[in-house]
């Protein structure tokens, strides 16, 4: 491509094209059909799970893992991942290897096992790769078969809500891909445990700023079980989580952010100011208003910001001020 041609491609056009290319590999909370079903024959397509009342009606339908299959260039990129570090990380990095706390070992027991699984599950099942499925199954199997009597999941060496939020996403994707009947009961018991425990042990640091990740899976489960306690949990998560809508309604970070500005050296980097400017936290916050707020907006209710206005506002600010998009 000539230099002049490169200069004519706007950031907006680049982001639009990049978003289209990524659709087939989005995580569980984001895989939406890109067109609504309008004809009489397709108003209730088989296999589609809609929002249950009193959640707001769907504008788009969520697709399960595997409903969109990669081909061509995209499939080739996934195969490169499978043949590279993504498909061999457990063989080269002890933190997700055989001694992982998420496999019952004494090794790393926080977020790294769940993060590995959250990417490994869709990679394995989109490629229908038996080798990768076997790797993922080890983590899934240990988690499903070692739930505590109170419903807690994960290594007993910590009770941090945050790494379990990542594992919830991985388990939901695994259930969609396999239909394993054990997943929904395990998630139901875990969310009951969380609802009972949060008043005395509220969200903190990473969990506080990623509460929407937790809420997305609770909504996913509600649409399959109809348990009203799950909506109570989502409201509690929203109340305890960081108010991203308030942050973006008065967006203060309109200049390059420095370590000193956000006081990164205070509280081991876990102070609210530092976490509210963290790049991944902000990226995940894009879902907070259009998904969680919209889902909880009952028919005839009101929302401080319309869901679509929130998402467009976030994107506008990100493209202007987020260094990764500049």
Image (cartoon, helix red, strand yellow):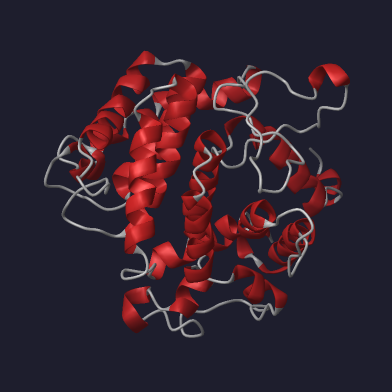
Of 118 and 143, nearer the camera is: 143
Relative image position of residue 208 (x, y in whole percent): 44, 67
Decide: is 316 above or below 253. Answer: above
Q: Is residue 128 left or right of residue 28?
A: left
Decide: is 43 above or below 304. Answer: above
Decide: is 34 above or below 12. Answer: above
Relative image position of residue 11 (x, y in whole percent): 78, 53
Q: Residue at x 46, y 15 (%)?
A: 128
Q: Residue at x 54, y 37 (%)?
A: 28
Can the viewer see residue 81? no
Q: Residue at x 65, y 26 (%)?
A: 48
Of 326 and 282, nearer the camera is: 282
Q: Residue at x 56, y 56 (%)?
A: 284
Of 275 and 173, nearer the camera is: 173
Relative image position of residue 55 (x, y in whole percent): 66, 48
Can the viewer see residue 15? yes
Q: Quadrant of residue 132?
A: top left
Q: Is residue 145 left or right of residue 86?
A: left
How many marks overall?
Answer: 0
Relative image position of residue 113 (x, y in whole percent): 30, 43
Q: Quadrant of the N terminus?
A: top right
Q: Quadrant of the C terminus?
A: bottom right
């Amino acid at each position: 491509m000539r230099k002049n041609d490169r200069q004519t491609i706007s950031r907006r056009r680049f982001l639009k094209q990049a978003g289209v290319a990524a659709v087939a590999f989005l995580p569980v909370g984001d895989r939406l059909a890109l067109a609504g079903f309008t004809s009489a024959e397709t108003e209730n397509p088989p296999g589609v799970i809609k929002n249950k009342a009193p959640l707001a009606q769907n504008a788009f339908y969520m697709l399960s893992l595997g409903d969109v299959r990669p081909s061509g260039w995209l499939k080739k990129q996934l195969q490169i991942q499978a043949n590279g570090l993504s498909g061999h990380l457990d063989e080269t990095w002890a933190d997700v290897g055989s001694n992982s706390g998420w496999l019952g070992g004494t090794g790393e027991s926080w977020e790294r096992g769940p993060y590995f699984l959250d990417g490994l599950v869709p990679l394995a099942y989109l490629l229908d790769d038996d080798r990768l499925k076997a790797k993922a199954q080890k983590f899934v199997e240990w988690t499903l078969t070692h739930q505590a009597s109170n419903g807690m999941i994960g290594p007993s060496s910590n009770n941090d809500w945050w790494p379990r939020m990542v594992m919830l996403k991985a388990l939901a994707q695994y259930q969609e891909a396999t239909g394993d009947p054990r997943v929904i009961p395990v998630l139901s018991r875990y969310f009951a445990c969380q609802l009972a425990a949060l008043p005395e042990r509220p969200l903190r640091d990473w969990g506080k700023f990623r509460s929407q990740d937790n809420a997305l899976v609770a909504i996913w489960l509600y649409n399959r079980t109809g348990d009203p306690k799950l909506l109570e949990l989502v409201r509690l998560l929203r109340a305890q989580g960081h108010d991203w809508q308030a942050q973006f309604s008065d967006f203060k970070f309109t200049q390059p952010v420095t370590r000193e500005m956000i006081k990164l050296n205070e509280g081991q980097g876990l102070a609210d100011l530092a976490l509210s400017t963290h790049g991944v936290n902000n990226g995940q916050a894009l879902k907070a208003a259009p998904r969680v707020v919209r889902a909880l907006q009952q028919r005839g209710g009101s929302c401080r910001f319309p869901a679509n206005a929130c998402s467009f506002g976030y994107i506008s600010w990100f493209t202007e001020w987020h260094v990764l998009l500049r």
